[in-house]
Amino acid sequence: MTHTDTASLTQQRWQQIQQRDPAADGRFIYAVITTGVYCRPSCPSRQAKAENLRFFDNTAQARAAGFRPCLRCKPDEAPGATRHNRITQLCRLIEQAEQTPTLQQLADSAGLSRWHLQREFRRETGLTPREYARAVRQQRLQQHLSGAGTTTDAAYAAGYSSSSHFYADAASELGMSASDYRQGGHQQQIRFATGPCPLGRVLVARSDLGVCAILLGDDDRQLEDNLRARFPNAQCTADHGLADQLRTVTAMIETPHQAPALPLDIRGTAFQRRVWQALQAIPPGQTRSYAQLAATLGTPTAARAVAGACAANPLAIAVPCHRIVRGDGSLSGYRWGVERKRALLEREAQGVKDD
């Protein structure tokens, strides 16, 4: 390596240390001459001056030169282990805080920039810190609404800063009003209708917020049983007035490139909702693998969790989990049957050819 190449590499490494770039972890180690310790590039400790640094390719070289490992960034541990521990600590911080910490407070606690914190947090959990905090607040709210005390008490105990924010979010967080949730959902009204479609029989169910279930099958009674199992405390009532929604679902099957969208009431965990939102962004006629979808979400190691979210999808067609295939392009499982999945993909592929 020439002197110019060495100088360029040193400058690049110095920039990565200044940025505390976690992507550089495992690529090199730096040691601080004045303290006698060696660190990984993302170390959150106070940064030393450039003239006091030495670079090594690995920890063994740093130890052989007489340096000891940093107790804060633990450079002898695998990079992923350090990230996991750091994000786990931040998750506990969010869970234990009475008020949700700001992104800057979390970044300061981790010794990272806000940008790096967002990237690391999403890579480890599949969610942004804000999404994780919202999921924690939702869980707290459900717990407090199930106990004694007023609805307002439950809102403040869950971490809402004002009752106005709580009432603005309650329906989307709970899928129903807070008062209905306190009664176990017994007051919630879910209307449904069944009918024929090109894939057999279809059930469309709607809450006050939008379509909350689209189920496929061959038997109306079984479809109704599946709906009631999903909403065990709701009042599920057949309603022939949902004929328009049935026609829209049929159009989504027959002409997926032209069908209108339905207003949806999507209920699930924060991660499930992120997966389902990403599924809706896949155009008709295209497919993705579980790994590709996980990478799109910024969680390349979460392919199995993505598969679980796809399997839990209650909105067939509208949330097109049928567009997910195996890495080799072959068909994977489908909640409503692989043959229906094949039929849907063939129709969508034909639509692309016709265009």
Image: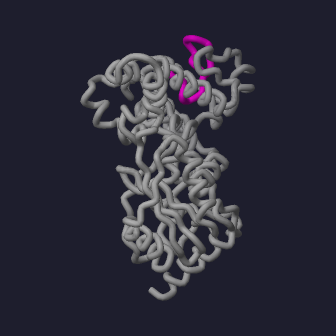
Find the magenta span and give its range.
Answer: 31-44
| 15 and 106: which is toward the camera | 106
Quadrant containing the C terminus in the rendered view: bottom left
- In the rendered image, residue 307, in percent from the top left (x then y), is placed at 64, 52
Name the residue located 46 percent from the left edge and 29 percent from the top edge: 142
Whether residue 36 is visible to the viewer of this picture, yes or no, is: yes
Query: Which of the 4 quarters of the picture holds residue 103?
Result: top left
**Residue 1, position as x, y percentages in the image:** 63, 44
Foreground pick, 42 / 335 = 335
Q: Is residue 117 at least partly visible in the picture? A: no
| Residue 118 point in image, percent of width and height | 45, 36
Q: What's the residue at 48%, 33% (across, down)?
A: 184
Q: Main secondary structure of the magenta part?
A: loop
Residue placed most toward the observer, 1 or 225: 225
Give the side of residue 207 with respect to residue 82, left or right.
left
Left or right of 153 on screen, residue 213: right
Residue 39 lies in the magenta-colored region: yes
